Amino acid sequence: MDYEISGLPMHVLLVHATVVFVPLAALCTLLSLLWPAARRRLGIVTPLIALLALVLVPVTAAAGAWLLDRIDTTPRINAHMQLAGTLLPWVVGVFLVALAQWLWFRYGTTQAEGMRRRMGTAGSRIAGIVAVVVALVLCGGAVATVALIGESGSRAVWEGSFRTGAED
């Protein structure tokens, strides 16, 4: 596939979508999990945003691999590629949490009552805390990884490429 649009490498364009949708998916997932009013308003939108983020990651990576074949590699670009390879598992986790929380709150009300009875008050609180901690770790990891990848990519492209002061 040709990863070029109007003479620009598609990776440059896709990166911006990935940088927006991965943190947005993480934020919507956490809001939906922790805030009932947000959950009601967001509904199916949360797992759909997470799915879009999940689709964007491998497409962006493929466009990046295409671009890598057309540029001179440097240690910074190699570091960027290494970091980029760590994002997909985080985004898969965010998607699974987004989907699970939506399914749970949409269809799991009767199962929730049965689980609360079997586990007791303390057990259901512990299960809820574990679910929130897992969601926080996955969402935080995804956002932190996107930030690290973006920072390494921008350094690979821009560091040392421009003057910091205006000429007189």
Image (spheres, rainbow, N blue to C red):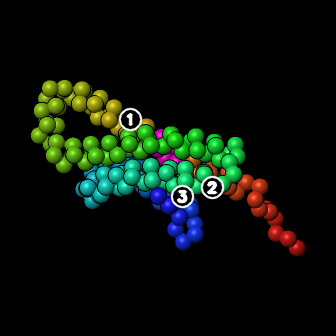
The residue under label 1 is 133
Q: Position of residue 22 (x, y in %)?
A: 44, 52
Outermost residue, front side: 1
The amino acid at mark 3 is: His
Amino acid type, residue under disc 1 in the picture: Val
Query: Depth check: 49 or 122 in front?
Result: 49
Q: Position of residue 45 (x, y in %)?
A: 30, 57
**Residue 37: quadrant of the picture:** bottom left
Query: Could you tell me if residue 19 is visible in this image?
Result: no
Q: Which mark is residue 146?
A: none
Please state the extent of the stretch shown in magenta in the rendering: 141-147
User: Residue 152 magenta-drawn?
Assistant: no
Closer to the camera in the image, 94 or 115: 94
Question: Which residue lies at the image location 64% right of the left edge and 43% below the top edge?
Answer: 78
Alpha carbons under labels 3 and 1: distance apart: 33 Å
Q: Is residue 133 above or below residue 48?
A: above
Does 165 appear above or below 139? below
User: What is the crowding at mark 1: few (fewer than 14 residues within 10 Å), some, or many (at least 20)?
Assistant: few
Count of picture labels: 3
Q: Which residue bears the numbered disc 3? A: 11
Q: Secondary structure at mark 2?
A: loop
Cβ–Cβ under 8 Å for marks 1 and 2 = no
Query: Residue at label 2?
Result: 70
Instruction: Please tell me which of labels 3 and 1 falls first in the chain.
Output: 3
Distance (Cα) linking label 1 and label 2: 42 Å
